[in-house]
Image (cartoon, rainbow, N blue to C red):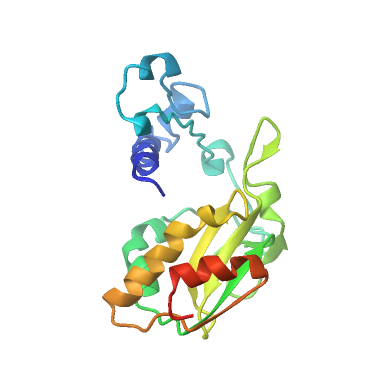
Amino acid sequence: MPIWLRKAFDACVAEAGRRNQEGVPLLYADHQTFWFYKKSNYFLLSKTSPELFNNPRFFLWDPKALCNDIPCLNCHHPLQWHGHIEGHSFNFRQHMAILSADICALDHSHKVMLMLLCDSCIAFSSLSCQITKHLARIDGEQIFTGLLSLTNELGQIQACNLVATKTHSQFELSMNGIQKSLDLYSHSQPQLIYTDTMADKQFLECCFPLL
């Protein structure tokens, strides 16, 4: 993710964390809107850096703040948000960074496993659907066309990115990050990568010279 976009995104995440006593984001409770504040483009015209002309708009979707109960698809008990992923994000990143990647598989998938299950049911049940068609839309247009993932020879995930198109620019940063983390943890670079399209061949050979 570009630095300018990361800064804007982090600022919205911090704003989304501001909530009232009922746990409702102030964006909903006070401002009565789903959209984060966005400057008018006119006031960016005096900026000297091209990156500062980027003016993304962010949308907050927090169903737990809008519905009293969201039931588990299996046992129908209300789901509880416990911040497990957010609280352990450092551990997840560290774990993925030290995984080997001698033989990999690159997949441009249009199906994602959508979990709407409680902790008791998530271990043995899941719902498969084309989530990228429903995840987010702007003016009725689909934003993400698929989920691009890279797994190693053990089936462990090295990268997992929602992408707007299948162009290589969508996952170039992710591939470069994998290459750097493999060097950092003294792993060998990938020697073989399976892909579902030969159009990836030249791009992957540039990212991983040992292929």
Question: Residue 147: x, y in percent?
Answer: 60, 59
**19 over 168 or under it: above or below:** above
Which residue is nearer to you in this view: 75 or 122?
122
The residue under the point 39% across, 36% down is 12
Q: Would you say 38 lies left or right of 64 here?
A: left
Task: Give the residue drawn at x 59%, y 46%.
Answer: 69
Give the image location of residue 51, x and y in percent: 36, 34
Place residue 126 in its image quadrant.
Answer: bottom right
Q: Nearer the viewer, residue 170 or 62?
A: 170
Is 43 rendered above or below residue 210? above
Q: Residue at x 71, y 64 (%)?
A: 128
User: Residue most toward the top?
Assistant: 42
Please tell me whether residue 140 is drawn above or below residue 175 in the rendered image: above
Q: Do we see residue 111 in this rendering?
A: yes
Residue 158 seen from this side = no
Instruction: Name the residue located 50 percent from the left edge and 80 percent from the top edge.
Output: 152
Q: Is residue 13 above or below residue 128?
A: above
Give the number of marks. Answer: 0
Front residue of 146 and 177: 177
Q: Position of residue 85 (x, y in %)?
A: 42, 60
Residue 33 rendering spot, x and y as whole percentages: 52, 24
